[in-house]
Amino acid sequence: MTLGRSNAEPFVAAEVEAVRTAAGAYEIAQYARYEVTGPEAEAWLDRLLASRLPEVGRIRLAPMLGERGRLMGDLTVTRLDEDRFWLTGSYHLQDWHLRWFLAHLPERGVELRNVTDAWMGFSISGPNARRILATLTSEDVSNEAFPFLSVRRMDVGSARAVVGRISFTGELGYELVVPVLHHRTLWCELREAGDEHGLRPIGDRALDSPAPREGVRDLVPRVPAGRDPGDVRPSTATSPSTRVPSSAARPRSREREVGPDRRLALLEVEAGDADAAMDDGRVARRSARGARDLGRLRAPRGDEPRPRVPGGGGRRGGGLRGRPPSSRWWSSARGRRARVLPEPPYDPTGSRLRS
């Protein structure tokens, strides 16, 4: 085992560069997808998810809380029609999430189907993503006609697809989802359309790597289940009107008044040739995510104790686990300087994502 850089580094770096300057294609068949339909679908999801539901043709991120008001998962909810929704989540949590869904499913008015193996697709992202999509469809996919977090059915190549204007790389992007029988054909058509626009396949490590991800996608999905949602998204974790199970009402009410004891922090570690950061011997973050062009290692999973709130029970301290904002972490068995970043270092306003 080594904490040094993998010999795959040059290949990952080339994939990252493609996403930054041209376009990358990532297969999204590994995400779980559930279809919720029926006259009571909206009311049921409004109870189940800790967020406001989107309007028809829109997408929204939606934390899901358990009985104690703690995170069970971070889903994406897509509203295709008034009474038809898609929920997208972690593939490996399907059994757990399905048990939770079915335990709270009403006797009538809502139908739930796991369509994970029936719909598959690809995410394309990068400055040239729109040009590639426009080559394959006659629809207007300009920013004005198809803004960020929109969803629409359209013909893409030879298939009817559900296209979402969403990206987890921090760059302009789209998710193209088709019936499984069209999956391979869509890939062939994407590659042909993308040849002149620099499209290349990217893998998990490249998806983990672009700098925007350290301030965007990692904010919830990699936080262990059971954490308070306010630890992750201080201002947008849940809707103020969110209803949680009765057993969670008291602790959630107190946490909203006092605030969480800890907040997710973004660290910048002087990485050198290291590929991991450690805190007291515990690996906190693997891979020099996105820092390949910045010469730093990011560690977005740090917990930053929240300053004490007058009259509340929050912990004192302004650094990582009681450390000052500039602290010493370990990588490759050597001490490394680290500091807490106030915002993502790359495109902090998200303008590229929304362009």
Image (cartoon, rainbow, N blue to C red):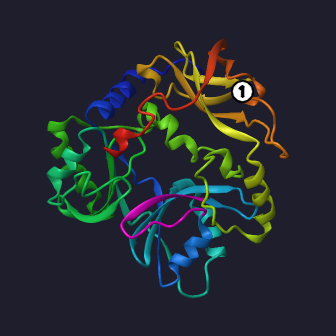
The quadrant the N terminus occupies is top right
Please provide the residue range marked out in magenta: 50-63
User: Horizontal placement of 7 versus 253: left or right?
Assistant: left
Q: Is residue 265 above or below residue 217?
A: above
User: Horizontal placement of 237 versus 172: left or right?
Assistant: right
Toward the viewer: 61 or 1? 61
Q: Residues within 10 Å of mark 1 (few under 14, many from 20)?
A: many
Q: Quadrant of residue 184?
A: bottom left
User: Horizontal placement of 155 versus 175: left or right?
Assistant: left
Looking at this rendering, what residue extends furthest in the bottom direction?
A: 108
Q: Quadrant of residue 79?
A: bottom left
Q: Which residue is mark 1?
A: 319
Helix, strand or loop under label 1:
loop
Does residue 141 show up magenta in the picture? Answer: no
The residue at 66%/74% (across/down) is 103
Image x and y of residue 174, in percent? 32, 51
Image x and y of residue 321, in percent? 75, 30
The residue at 36%/39% (across/down) is 351
Image x and y of residue 66, in percent? 70, 62
